[in-house]
Image (spheres, rainbow, N blue to C red):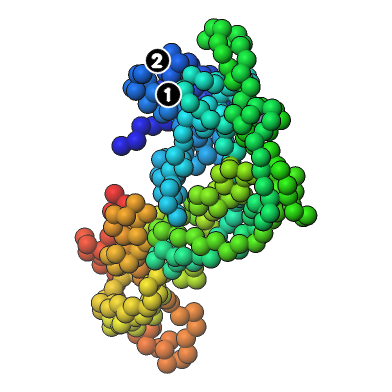
């Protein structure tokens, strides 16, 4: 079981942005590799804190984490990867500019090369029917991505000689230390543009439409976000591509209402069908099925079709389809019908006499969710 991000930082769920930052700063200092050389446990803690901070410091990610927990990110790996896209030490160090007010930590980890520039993420929305959500689906979506233009070449930055960093001595909260600031000529990439074709931007990139295949797992929900690693904008030089973030939008279904992994269906039957019993066709996410209505069925009865709901996103089991029986009362009658019902009205056999197992609607609902 993955540790709670709030627990990792030792804060409550109601912590403010400033408190989150402060808590992370404290952990980062405590477990910093420079202060704990060769201590793998400390490095692990350091990474955990960085991962927690990456999510909790981003309002959007924090909201999703608060709502769905780790699942919000772990299931997002359509197209592989998933999770946090494997945060490495470089990503973590890149957070320090924010935390320590510029500069960043260099050197300490040993052997850090130039910063690999990451392309920006792209965001799209995908509308899915309940049927698609029930089965999982592959969507081919046209996306406008920035790509390195053909003919663009890059060369080593002359200012930092490709290291991406300029070393300097500064006073930090950890004391006097050697820090490496990103080279401001190449932005830390260690590379500069050499030549580019007409039409490419200053970084040698052009925008092109590309069809991206997105594997959507069964059981996703409205508002969830999937990540397709590497399908965002490309970065210049030897940088790495950003990600394509796919927001899921669930389309309303004509007949079925979703509630978590369960589905609800309102079935209307005539008084005659209620009295005599009937066979009725109903919609499910996998086509129509016939169900038997017993004679003497009561309005409000709920029939449970096991496994006819939505598969659980975590892969364990499926929800049910709950068919709510509603007896439809005619609003007008002809003379003959009226005479029939008037006659039956006087017949004591039609007096309601609910038995113990004819539970009221509210009791049934209570049972269903208890
Ligand atoms: Zn440079």
Question: Sequence-wise, which precedes: disc 1 or disc 2?
Answer: 2
Q: Position of residue 128 (x, y in %)?
A: 51, 64
Q: Position of residue 316 (x, y in %)?
A: 29, 54
Q: Which mark is residue 322?
A: none
Check whether the beta carbons of the residues at disc 1 and disc 2 lie within 8 A of each other: yes
Q: Residues within 10 Å of mark 2 (few under 14, many from 20)?
A: few
Taking the spot 67% from the left edge, 59% from the top edge, the residue there is 208
Q: In the displayed structure, does residue 176 sit left or right of residue 66?
A: right
Quadrant in the rendering for residue 260 = bottom left
The residue that mark 1 highlights is 46
The residues tagged by marks 1 and 2 sit, at their Cα atoms, a distance apart of 10 Å
Relative to 363, say whether 118 is above or below. above
Give the camera-side residue of 72 and 278.
Answer: 72
Q: Position of residue 271 (x, y in %)?
A: 36, 79
Of tags 1 and 2, the one toward the viewer is: 2
Numbered-mark total: 2
Kind of element beneath mark 1: helix
Relative to 131, say whether 5 is above or below. above
Kind of element beneath mark 2: loop
Relative to 203, say whether 134 is above or below. below
Taking the spot 61% from the left edge, 62% from the top edge, the residue there is 210
CB of mark 2 near ligand 1 (< 8 Å): no
Which residue lies most toward the left here?
A: 356
Quadrant in the rendering for residue 218 = bottom left
Give the camera-side residue of 57 and 181.
Answer: 181
The residue that mark 2 highlights is 36
Relative to 164, say whether 205 is above or below. below
């Amino acid at each position: 079981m993955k540790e709670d991000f709030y627990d990792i930082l030792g804060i409550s769920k109601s912590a403010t942005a400033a408190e989150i930052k402060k808590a992370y700063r404290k952990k980062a200092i405590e477990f910093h590799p420079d202060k704990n050389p060769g201590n793998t446990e400390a490095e692990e803690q350091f990474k955990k804190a960085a991962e927690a901070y990456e999510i909790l410091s981003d309002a959007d990610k924090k909201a999703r984490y608060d709502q769905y927990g780790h699942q919000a990110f772990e299931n997002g790996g359509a197209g592989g990867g998933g999770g946090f896209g494997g945060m490495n030490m470089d990503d973590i160090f890149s957070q320090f500019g924010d935390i320590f007010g510029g500069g960043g930590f260099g050197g300490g980890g040993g052997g850090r090369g130039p910063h690999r520039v990451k392309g920006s993420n792209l965001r799209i929305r995908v509308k899915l029917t309940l049927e698609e959500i029930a089965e999982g689906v592959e969507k081919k979506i046209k996306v406008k991505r920035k790509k390195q233009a053909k003919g663009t070449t890059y060369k080593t930055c002359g200012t930092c000689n490709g290291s991406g960093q300029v070393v300097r001595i500064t006073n930090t909260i950890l004391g006097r230390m050697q820090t490496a600031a990103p080279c401001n000529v190449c932005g830390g990439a260690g590379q500069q543009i050499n030549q580019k074709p007409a039409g490419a931007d200053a970084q040698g990139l052009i925008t092109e439409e590309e069809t991206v295949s997105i594997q959507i797992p069964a059981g996703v929900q409205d508002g969830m976000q999937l990540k397709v690693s590497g399908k965002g904008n490309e970065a210049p030089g030897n940088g790495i591509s950003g990600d394509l973030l796919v927001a899921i939008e669930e389309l309303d279904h004509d007949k079925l209402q979703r509630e978590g992994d369960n589905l609800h269906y309102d079935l209307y039957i005539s008084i005659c069908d209620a009295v005599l019993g009937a066979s009725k066709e109903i919609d499910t996410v996998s086509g129509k099925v016939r169900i038997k209505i017993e004679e003497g069925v009561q309005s409000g009865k709920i029939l449970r079709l096991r496994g006819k709901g939505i598969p659980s996103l975590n892969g364990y089991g499926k929800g049910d389809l709950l068919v709510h029986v509603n007896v439809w009362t005619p609003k007008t009658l002809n003379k003959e019908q009226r005479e029939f019902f008037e006659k039956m009205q006087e017949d004591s056999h039609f007096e309601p006499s609910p038995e113990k197992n004819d539970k009221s609607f509210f009791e049934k609902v209570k049972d269903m969710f208890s």
